[in-house]
């Protein structure tokens, strides 16, 4: 993970699923309700199976009709009927007929709709058994306690594939701060090993942020819908093709066309869809690589600066970093300081929790840019935003593998001082001398009035 399931409408296959497979797509999602109501496709799917009809031999997930319910208010199919149909046509992941509660719904109504969804998930288990590949949608609108409760109850019922639903209105309105809360709150209730699918999320600019919050799988029809509107997806946003003078991409479509040729092409919509999907898949690969290399938060920092609302979502994630930090890897390749936000990253939070476990001797020198008198046997390097770095940790992640600017700023020094305080508070008998420069002398004297500060 992460992975992307492009949405495929059987009536509007602008990119055939077989072509998607060649582009690196390993799974797709389609709508079982559309199949069930289609004279053209229902019988074929029942006889030949979903994979044969769509010409795709990878994973196929089916939505139940809940999307149509969110748009039109109701659907003429029952929970049992849609699940039985999904089973019959050979879907790999089924979705019960949950109620996608709009984010702005009143709390009492949210609770009522949640209970209906829980009843339908329970019914699904009773009818089809615990081994059926049924997903457990997590609803709850924007109420954090309800999202957490939903996640907990979904996990207690035994669901391990858990879509976080009804978030498209948040993304359409650029309400990324609330989206971050929804994901984190749902994750708090879910079992740690649950696979989290963010329903309807498909723009590459927000993948890194969502993965940092705990998401594993995405799906979207954005590649096709945006192409229909003449919109060109990039990793940092969306452009209108008619307003573009260059194609800033190296995908096959952009390499083989000039921007003017693309604008005038009779296949413009199809070509745009190919570009949009290629860019989206490339970003999934980029995020996956960042996860493996331990550089995800650097990618989040980069992507979230493309739009003020995304940046607001990033700041919200950092405000709740203690709830995310416990899932962070203990060792990574590097830590690059990129500004104030880097001080709030999980690596710093976890280091500050770890450092008090170190036992100091009777006398120690904290070297913060000043002279190093030879009389000290124990010397701690001061490396903001982490703080004190004992010799034994000088080559280990994170502090020992951190690249920070040679010129410190106030915010990073403030966080470094927090780390030093955490260590000294658990070693109250240690006599401390802090060696620093004139620029930071006052800060250290104020923070540590009982320590000797030399310049």
Image (cartoon, grey):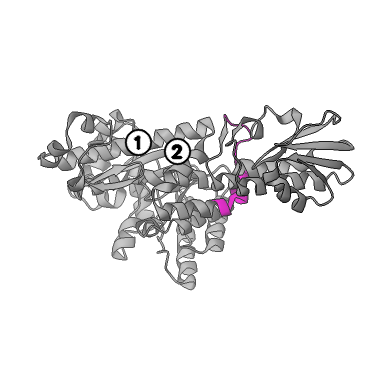
**In the image, residue 306 lies at what x, y percent?**
39, 47
* 402 vs 312, nearest the viewer: 402
Label 1 neighbour load within 10 Å: few <14, some 14-19, many 20+: many
- Whether residue 29 appears in magenta in the rendering, the answer is no
**In the image, residue 214 lies at what x, y percent?**
52, 45
* 325 vs 432, nearest the viewer: 432
Q: Is residue 49 left or right of residue 241?
A: right
Where is residue 454, by image quadrant?
Answer: top right
Q: For the residue labelled by badge 1, is the local secondary structure a helix, a strand or a loop? A: helix
Label 2 neighbour load within 10 Å: few <14, some 14-19, many 20+: many
Give the CA separation, mark 2 to mark 1: 10 Å
On the rendered image, what quadrant is the C terminus found in? Answer: top right
**In the image, residue 64 lies at what x, y percent?**
35, 52
Name the residue tied to disc 2. Answer: 2
Is residue 126 depicted above or below 296 in this figure?
Answer: below
Residue beneath the point at 70% across and 29% down: 394
Tell me if I can see residue 202 in this picture.
yes
Q: Is residue 322 left or right of residue 302?
A: right
* 133 vs 106, nearest the viewer: 106
**In the image, residue 271 lies at what x, y percent?**
19, 37
Q: Which mark is residue 74?
A: none
| Magenta span | 318-333
Residue beneath the point at 43% across and 69% down: 105
Q: Is residue 386 left or right of residue 427?
A: left
Q: Which mark is residue 281?
A: 1
Is residue 402 depicted above or below 317 in this figure?
Answer: above
């Amino acid at each position: 993970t992460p992975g992307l399931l492009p949405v495929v409408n059987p009536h509007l296959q602008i990119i055939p699923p077989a072509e998607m497979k060649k582009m690196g797509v390993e799974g797709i999602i389609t709508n079982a309700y559309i199949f069930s109501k289609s004279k053209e496709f229902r019988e074929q799917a029942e006889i030949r199976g979903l994979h044969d009809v769509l010409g795709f031999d990878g994973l196929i997930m089916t939505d139940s009709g809940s999307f149509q319910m969110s748009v039109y208010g109701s659907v003429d199919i029952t929970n049992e009927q849609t699940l039985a149909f999904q089973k019959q046509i050979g879907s790999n992941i089924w979705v019960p007929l949950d109620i996608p509660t709009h984010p702005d719904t009143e709390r009492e109504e949210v609770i009522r709709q949640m209970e209906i969804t829980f009843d339908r998930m329970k019914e699904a288990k009773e009818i089809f058994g615990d081994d059926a590949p049924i997903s457990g949608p997590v609803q709850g609108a924007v109420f954090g306690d309800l999202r957490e409760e939903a996640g907990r109850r979904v996990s207690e019922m035994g669901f391990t594939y858990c879509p976080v639903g009804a978030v498209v209105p948040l993304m359409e309105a650029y309400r990324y701060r609330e989206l971050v809360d929804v994901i984190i709150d749902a994750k708090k209730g879910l079992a740690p090993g649950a696979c989290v699918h963010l329903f309807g999320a498909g723009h590459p600019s927000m993948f890194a942020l969502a993965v940092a919050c705990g998401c594993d799988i995405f799906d979207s029809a954005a590649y096709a819908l945006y192409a229909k509107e003449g919109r060109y997806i990039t990793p940092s946003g969306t452009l209108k093709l008619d307003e573009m003078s260059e194609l800033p991409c190296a995908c096959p479509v952009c390499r083989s066309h000039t921007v003017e040729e693309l604008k005038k092409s009779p296949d413009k919509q199809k070509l745009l869809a190919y570009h949009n999907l290629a860019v989206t898949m490339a970003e999934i690969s980029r995020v996956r690589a960042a996860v493996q290399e331990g550089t995800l938060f650097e990618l989040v920092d980069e992507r979230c600066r493309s739009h003020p609302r995304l940046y607001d979502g990033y700041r919200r994630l950092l405000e709740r970093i203690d709830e995310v930090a416990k899932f962070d890897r203990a060792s990574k390749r590097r830590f690059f300081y990129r500004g104030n936000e880097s001080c709030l990253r999980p690596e710093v939070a976890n280091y500050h929790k770890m450092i008090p476990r170190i036992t100091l001797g009777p006398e120690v020198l904290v070297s913060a840019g000043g002279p190093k008198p030879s009389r000290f046997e124990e010397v701690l390097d001061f490396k903001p935003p982490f703080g004190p770095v004992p010799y034994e940790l000088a080559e280990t992640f994170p502090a020992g593998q951190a690249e920070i600017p040679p010129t410190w700023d106030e915010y990073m020094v403030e966080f470094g001082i927090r780390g030093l305080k955490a260590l000294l508070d658990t070693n109250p008998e240690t006599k401390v001398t802090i060696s620093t420069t004139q620029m930071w002398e006052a800060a250290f004297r104020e923070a540590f009035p009982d320590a000797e500060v030399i310049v």
